[in-house]
Image (cartoon, helix red, strand yellow):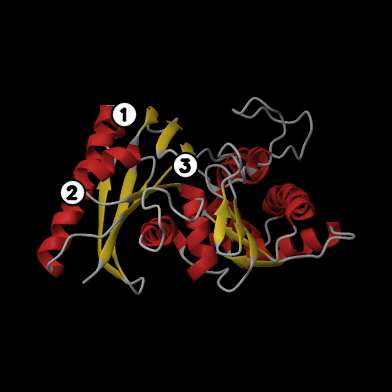
Amino acid sequence: MRHVIALDVGGTGMKAALVGEDGALLHRARRATGRERGPDAVVAGILDFAAELRAHGLEQYGEPAAAAGIAVPGIVDEEHGTAVYAANLGWRDVPLRALLADRLGVPVALGHDVRTGGLAEGRIGAGRGTDRFLFVPLGTGIAGAIGLDGRVEAGAHGFAGEIGHIVVRPGGSACPCGQRGCLERYASASAVSEAWAAACGNPDADAADCAGAVASGDPNAVRVWQEAVDALADGLVTAVTLLDPRTLIIGGGLAEAGEVLFRPLRDAVRRRVTFQKAPTIVPAALGDTAGCLGAGLIARDLLTTDTPTTPEVST
């Protein structure tokens, strides 16, 4: 059975799959990244994991994978196949595509984790059939993936979609990026957790607890939540003004609150648009499998291009 290897590398764990020609996940596996052992160990672990997946495919289906796709965090140079920098993993300028291609003996595509997840949401998830979308996962931070006619825009230097660093509160909280008032300092899951822990006096309280308190009508929680929603709406309307997406796909941990988030967010965005066309706002559909599914997609794209080491989709 013709299949590809898909790898999604996170800060603490790796998710992987063998993906069939029809997009079916034939085999799934997980491993720890082993980041506590240093960046060289992380890279070695990725290569070993990929080799195990190749061997499994050969044993089960009688042939090795035809290609591989890998999604990684941080700064990624997809054109040259380099994992430029990832704070959580400690690596710099790792020629990951070449290393994997040498280990596996097949073409390899390298993608940024959020853009790769956005590609999956756009093609086979919540944005399926949409020509223009913006995928925004609300997690520890906030990033974005700009979807254009079946591909995801990386930008001239690989930074396209960094919506979390739109300044929504000038002069506000300091952000690790060096600015003040960035969106992710107010509307990420970690920002909501921090604000709610301070408001309720429980250092262990998190964003999910805040959402639960909002649903039960706690006025203190409603205030904290609305402040986050308002900041998020400000950032999203800025993005809408620049990009004019047809659909906004909201994912990540904060989106798990469901209508507790989406109802006030839709209202807040609607109040802010003037001449802009308000996009449809929908929850992401693929959850934590998006990155892995996207890695499978960029691997499969290699099999339909004339240049097997550079994917047609810029992810």
Q: Is residue 247 above or below residue 198?
A: below
Quadrant of the rendered structure where residue 93 is? top left
Q: Amino acid at mark 2?
A: Ala
Q: Is residue 69 above or below residue 284?
A: above
226 horizontally vs 191: left or right = right
Q: Which residue is mark 1?
A: 39
94 horizontally vs 146: left or right = left
At which x and y percent is residue 81?
Answer: 40, 40
Q: CA distance from mark 1 to mark 2?
A: 19 Å
Of the two numbered discs 1 and 3 in the rendering, the one whose residue sits closer to the viewer? 3
Residues at discs 1 and 2 in contact (Cβ within 8 Å): no
Q: Secondary structure at mark 1?
A: helix
Q: Earlier in the sequence, mark 2 or mark 3?
A: 2
The residue sitting at 15% across, 59% down in the picture is 56
- Disc ID at residue 200: none
- Disc ID at residue 79: 3
Q: Which residue is mark 2?
A: 51
At which x and y percent is residue 106?
Answer: 25, 51
Q: Amino acid at mark 1?
A: Pro
Q: Secondary structure at mark 2?
A: helix
The residue sitting at 45% across, 30% down in the picture is 85
Of the two numbered discs 2 and 3 in the rendering, the one whose residue sits closer to the viewer? 3
Q: Earlier in the sequence, mark 1 or mark 3?
A: 1
> Crowding at label 2, few (<14), some or many (≥20) Cα neighbours within 10 Å?
some
Camera sees residue 5 = yes
Q: Nearer the viewer, residue 239 or 172?
A: 239
Q: Amino acid at mark 3?
A: Glu
